């Protein structure tokens, strides 16, 4: 069983640089220098953002020689997707119920 993330993944995505990093990693795995070359922030800043994303369970890293290679952690992204699907499902059900009640009362007035 996977451990719970140390940080809130939704809070981690509150920063536009972290969202940009995650988007780059969704394309393919990358090392810090590659990410830094794509963004207007320094390598140390990229490393700090990656640490936040890793702590939130959204990215994983592995050693390749002296370099760290980062990629999206599918488990963390799937957990967020499942959570959002549950929220949207409940909201959709409430909306449907409200819409049926409104259309039902309109029919009674005719």
Image (tube, rainbow, N blue to C red):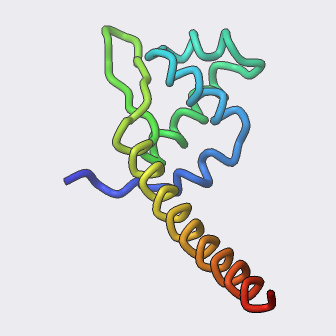
* Quarter of the rendering occupied by the C terminus: bottom right
The outermost residue toward the left is: 1
Residue at 40 percent of width and 51 percent of height? 79
Residue at 40 percent of width and 18 percent of height? 68
Residue 83 vertical position relative to residue 20 in the rendered view, above or below: below
The outermost residue toward the bottom is: 108
The number of callouts visible is 0
Kindly indicate the quadrant of the structure image that contains residue 109. Answer: bottom right
Kindly indicate the quadrant of the structure image that contains residue 63. Answer: top left
Residue 58 vertical position relative to residue 80 in the rendered view, above or below: above
Kindly indicate the quadrant of the structure image that contains residue 62. Answer: top left
Residue 90 vertical position relative to residue 1 in the rendered view, above or below: below
x and y percent of residue 17 in the render?
A: 70, 32
Q: Nearer the viewer, residue 73 or 85?
A: 85
x and y percent of residue 29 in the render?
A: 44, 17
Residue 57 vertical position relative to residue 87 in the rendered view, above or below: above
Residue at 42 percent of width and 25 percent of height? 71
x and y percent of residue 76 in the render?
A: 40, 45
The outermost residue toward the right is: 110
Q: Nearer the viewer, residue 79 or 7?
A: 79
* Quarter of the rendering occupied by the N terminus: bottom left
52 horizontally vs 75: left or right? right
x and y percent of residue 74 in the render?
A: 37, 36
81 horizontally vs 1: left or right? right
20 horizontally vs 58: left or right? right
């Amino acid at each position: 069983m996977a451990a719970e993330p140390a940080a809130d993944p939704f809070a981690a995505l509150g920063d536009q640089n972290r969202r940009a990093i995650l988007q780059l990693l969704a394309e393919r795995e990358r090392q810090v220098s590659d990410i830094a070359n794509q963004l207007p922030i320094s390598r140390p800043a990229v490393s700090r953002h990656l640490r936040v994303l890793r702590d939130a369970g959204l990215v994983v890293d592995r050693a390749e020689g002296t370099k760290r290679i980062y990629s999206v952690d599918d488990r963390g992204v799937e957990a967020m997707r499942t959570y959002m699907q549950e929220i949207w499902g409940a909201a959709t059900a409430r909306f449907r119920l409200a819409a049926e009640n409104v259309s039902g009362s309109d029919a009674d007035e005719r």
